[in-house]
């Protein structure tokens, strides 16, 4: 009975600590946005609360607290999630949150990274797409499916056709049927082979960060030249490049999920958007998967982290975790509140 009471007390402490952190950050976020004449609605507040809860779980699993993370990193992510109305607990998924290592001076520090994926792209497109009236369900076309491309006769368009034959084959393309305000339906198509540019950038970035002891400069240049003309399947299997391709691209359980994710991102990114607010536009741009934007620890690979996210959320069964939360959260909440006051947005 004593053990049960102790467990209940710890759960209560965790809930109280989490609630305090949520209230601290969201209150500061509301005040900051008010100065920009941006008023958060109830759903945006829910998005912010869920982000803080996700951060708490990740920090707990790492044996860290919010005091170990730069405040600006946290609030910037909250700004992005709320401005774009992205809910990290939504199903299907709209966004992800992972840890990255960045170099600050001569030391490496953990930071959170936030990005859009899956239905988050569709949500942004529905809200900010230029003249977009409705985003219809996407077509995920796979090997063996019957598909015909749209045809054109002047300004008249014959729509594409798609007849699925299965749901387990390799993805060959994604199609976004988008209805415009004038009633016209446009079809935006991203081809599987286009993802090779994403993989080439991934390899190039890993090579640029590699030390001379791991691969000589001349060999880097040679490998980059070799992969420049390769197709996606050839590149994934290319032996000299294997050390510079993360498992998320190669493993059977995550490769297709990664390729589909890249296809959706690539397709939506090209569709014109009007954010009508510079802060929202900046928030969207901050989610771009630009491998050059961080001086990242080469030992920490973003794709591996995303693979873990994909695998975690692909499971239908619940996952039990043993969290140890004690009174330090109470102190952490008060310290973080003071920290936020000293470091405004």
Image (cartoon, helix red, strand yellow):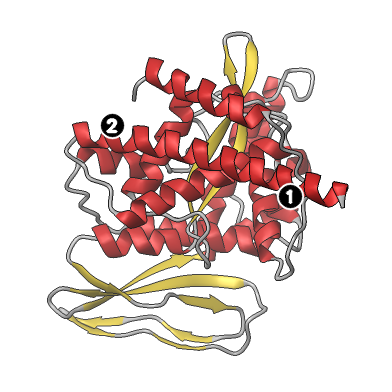
Residue at 32%, 55% (x, y): give it.
42
Q: Give the alpha-carbon distance from disc 1 to disc 2, as whole Å.
A: 36 Å
Q: Mark 1 touching mark 2, by CB under 8 A?
A: no
Tag 1 residue: 8
- Identify the element where label 2 is drawn: helix
4 to 157, vertically: above or below: above
- Residue 57 placed where, x, y %? 64, 43
Could you tell me how many numbered marks the image carries?
2
Tag 2 residue: 32
**Left-right relation of 86 to 1:** left
48 to 158, vertically: above or below: above
**Mark positioned earlier in the residue sequence (1 or 2):** 1
Nearest to the observer: residue 62 or residue 230: 62
Nearest to the observer: residue 311 or residue 304: 311
Q: Which mark is residue 133?
A: none
- Based on the displayed image, in which of its 4 quarters is residue 193 positioned? bottom right
**Left-right relation of 156 to 315:** left
> Looking at the image, which residue sits at the far front?
1
**Left-right relation of 175 to 52:** left
- Residue 129 placed where, x, y %? 25, 60
199 to 139, vertically: above or below: above
Residue at 40%, 33% (x, y): give it.
76
- Residue 243 placed where, x, y %? 77, 39
- Identify the element where label 1 is drawn: helix
Q: Residues within 10 Å of mark 1 (few under 14, many from 20)?
A: few
Q: Residues within 10 Å of mark 2 (few under 14, many from 20)?
A: some
């Amino acid at each position: 009975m004593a053990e049960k009471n102790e467990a209940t007390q710890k759960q209560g402490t965790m809930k109280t600590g989490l609630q305090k952190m949520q209230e601290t950050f969201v209150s500061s976020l509301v005040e900051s946005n008010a100065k920009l004449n941006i008023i958060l609605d109830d759903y945006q507040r829910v998005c912010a609360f869920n982000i803080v809860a996700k951060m708490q779980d990740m920090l707990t699993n790492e044996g860290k607290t919010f005091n170990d993370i730069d405040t600006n990193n946290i609030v910037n992510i909250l700004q992005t999630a709320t401005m774009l109305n992205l809910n990290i607990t939504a199903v299907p998924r709209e966004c992800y949150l992972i840890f990255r290592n960045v170099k600050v001076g001569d030391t490496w520090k953990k930071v959170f990274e936030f990005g859009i994926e899956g239905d988050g792209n569709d949500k942004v497109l529905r809200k900010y797409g230029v003249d977009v009236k409705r985003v219809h369900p996407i077509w995920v076309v796979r090997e063996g499916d019957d598909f015909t491309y749209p045809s054109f006769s002047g300004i008249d368009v014959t729509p594409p056709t798609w007849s699925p034959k299965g749901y387990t084959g390799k993805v060959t393309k994604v199609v976004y049927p988008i209805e415009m305000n004038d009633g016209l339906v446009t079809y935006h198509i991203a081809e599987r082979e286009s993802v090779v540019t994403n993989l080439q950038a991934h390899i190039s970035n890993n090579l640029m960060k590699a030390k001379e002891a791991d691969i000589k400069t001349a060999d880097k240049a040679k490998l980059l030249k070799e992969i420049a003309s390769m197709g996606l399947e050839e590149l994934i299997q290319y032996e000299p490049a294997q050390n510079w391709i993360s498992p998320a691209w190669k493993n059977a359980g995550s490769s297709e999920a990664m390729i589909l994710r890249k296809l959706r991102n690539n397709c939506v990114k090209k569709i014109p958007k009007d954010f009508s607010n510079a802060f929202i536009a900046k928030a969207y741009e901050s989610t771009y998967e630009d491998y050059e934007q961080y001086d990242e620890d080469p030992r920490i690979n973003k794709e591996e982290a995303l693979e873990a996210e994909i695998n975690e959320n692909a499971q239908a069964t619940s996952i039990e975790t043993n969290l140890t939360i004690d009174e330090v959260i109470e102190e952490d909440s008060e310290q973080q509140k003071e920290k936020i006051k000293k470091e405004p947005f």
